[in-house]
Image (spheres, grey):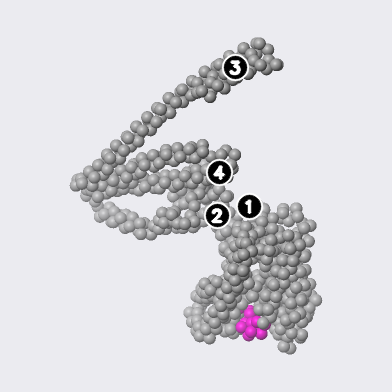
Amino acid sequence: MKVTGFISLWMLVSLPCGPLANPGEHEDVVKHAIKLHRGKGAVITQRKQWVLESCRKLSGLLRQKNVVLNKLKNAMRAVEKDAGLSDEEKLFQVHTFEIFQKELNESENSVFQAIHGLQRALQGDYKDVVNMKESSRQRLEALREAAIKEEMEYVELLAAEKHQVEALKNMQHQNKSLSMLDEILEDVRKAADRLEEEIEEHAFDDNKSVRGVNFEAVLRVEEDEANSKRNASKREVEDDLGLSMLIDSQNNQYILTKPRDSTIPRADHHFIKDIVTIGMLSLPCGWLCTTIGLPTMFGYIICGVLLGPSGLNSIKSIVQVETLGEFGVFFTLFLVGLEFSPERLRKVWKISLQGPCYMTVLMIAFGLLWGHLLQIRPTQSVFISTCLSLSSTPLVSRFLAGSVRGDKEGDIDYSSVLLGMLVMQDVQLGLFIAIMPTLIQAGVSTYSSIFKEILRILILIGQILFSLAAVFLICLVIKTYLIGPYYRKLHAESKGNKEILILGITAFIFLMLTITELLDVSMELGCFLAGALISSQGHMVTEEIMSCIEPIRDFLAIIFFASIGLHVFPTFVIYELTVLLFLTLSVVIMKFVLAVLVLSLILPKTSQYIKWIVSAGLAQVSEFSFVLGSRARRAGIISREVYLLILSVTTLSLLLAPALWRAAIMKCVPRPERRSST
């Protein structure tokens, strides 16, 4: 009050001294200042009165709340002692009192939380963005907790309503005799209630207090329909089944994975539509590529581009499509292993082991050199070099499909060397995924802890080598004692019914996949070894199994290559076409030259001619760079721009791979074998 009066008096004294003001304006300003002074005084007086009245009301409400709580406790004791009420009625009334009691306590807590928030805001510095951010975060956490509590209270009210209905039914049953059918239905209802209670997991209550779990606000979106009545009915059904989509504040979209009520069958119609759309559009895209002389896999990639975020954006379940596409990789590598006998593996195992290791080391060395010249962090240089050193096993497997692979005059077959090196690169992929957390920590650690990080990497390499030894020991046991009787049993049970044979082979693939995953080795290696073990049973066995598995592989491969197209962005490629072409050609030429150099050192003199074909097969970037790049981007190893460059270079290198492969085949392979290879 004193401050306001001083300001108003100062205005009255200082305003007439203005040299540009006339007497008429002085009088108007003085009247306005007096009015303003009186208004502020009136406002402050009213504000004090409002504060006093509000405090009295709040104090009265708190006293009234305590009185009501005591009455609720007495009422609950009375209900529990009332012998005239049934157990269902007692449960319902006590539950209702407890919910009302919790509502009173939460309302009181909300009032004091708001007061504390106001006090914290007044004590903060309005110029300090960090302080305001922290205050905003605390308010957001409070709102999230309040929303969770309100949601739980609503669920409890639904449960109380259910108890009320049960109590009313029990009262009706006591007043009238039930028929036999009604008694049966009543028993079934009770059994169904017990079943729901047994299978319900209470995942929300079990995980909300777990460390690392955060409360977040999400949007629940229903699918729009042209017909409003149909939309309303569908919304009611989806509310019950939980099939609507959730979107968080980071624009991530979620769908139902496990429902609360497992007794009702559900289907993800978005995923069904996505698979149907991919299947229909893959046919014309694949046919078009076949017409112009390109491999059909590029048609499937184009299909993914057209349907993905850079095209029509009609694929809703991107993660699910990619997950299903991974099975295409599994079955592709199984068929590769089925054609890759252990005898051939023993013949080229030294080359397969040494070649990828030397190439990876050279790629990392060149990457560190260029990173030093361009002032790129060593962690980022190592990651990019490792990504670019990998080659696509599914793509090369398609190149080699149906090719003639017989050794001539003691020479090493190029397909054996190429596949062996690719399988070893898959092992390196598993190793790199395993050491990625250490690479992330190395990017933020100081030089004093570099020795510890190097030691951790060496320990991880030792663990991987131990896991590889264990895997091959298991394969030796399976080949010696198990695979023969297992296949003979499948063959005997599947006469006239191929279903048992397909399921048995698929189960064996998944068994080997699980073994390699448990031993922290690449799952793809397990699929390859499964095929190699079965191929040891002879040519007739290989032909029979291949005829059964190939249709499954072809369909899943379509999904896999379409999922690659979902991550291709033509607009970005067009905007940066010159830079991307230069980078892609540099990577392809570098990988080709390094492969030729390494193979010149490790191949026998009689087989030096195959180094050109093998190098051409390795001169592209694996599609698994998408997976590694996405993980590195989330971890902060690489930026968004580097991630897009890796995706674009990978895509362009895969597009250039068929031309380079055909050129190498035309130059180095004799004419009879060339026809089958191309």
Q: Label 2 sits on what residue type?
A: His
Instruction: Give SS at disc 1.
Output: loop
The residue beneath circle 4 is 131
In the rendering, at what x and y percent does residue 20 appear? Answer: 70, 16
CB under 8 Å between discs 4 and 1: no
- From the viewer's perspective, is residue 543 above or below residue 265? below
> Would you say residue 265 is visible in this rendering?
yes
Q: Nearer the viewer, residue 160 or 565?
A: 160
Nearer the observer: mark 3 or 4; the answer is 3
- Amino acid type of disc 4? Asn
- Mark 3, residues whose alpha carbon is within 10 Å: few (<14), some, or many (≥20)? some
- The residue under the point 20% across, 46% down is 81
Measure how far apart labels 3 and 4 are at the Cα level. Answer: 39 Å
Q: What amino acid is found at the position of numbered circle 1 in the picture?
A: Asn
Numbered disc in front, either 3 or 1: 3
Task: State which quadrant residue 146 falls in.
Answer: top left
Range covered by the magenta-colored residues: 338-349
Mark number for residue 104?
A: none
Residue 12 is labelled as 3
The C terminus lies in which quarter of the figure? bottom right
Which type of secondary structure does the marked residue at label 4 adopt?
A: helix
Q: Residue at x 72, y 88 (%)?
A: 410
The residue labelled by disc 1 is 313
Front-lying residue, 668 or 33: 33
Query: Sequence order check: which comes first, mark 3 or mark 4?
Result: 3
Q: Is residue 461 left or right of residue 391?
A: left
Residue wearing tag 2 = 270
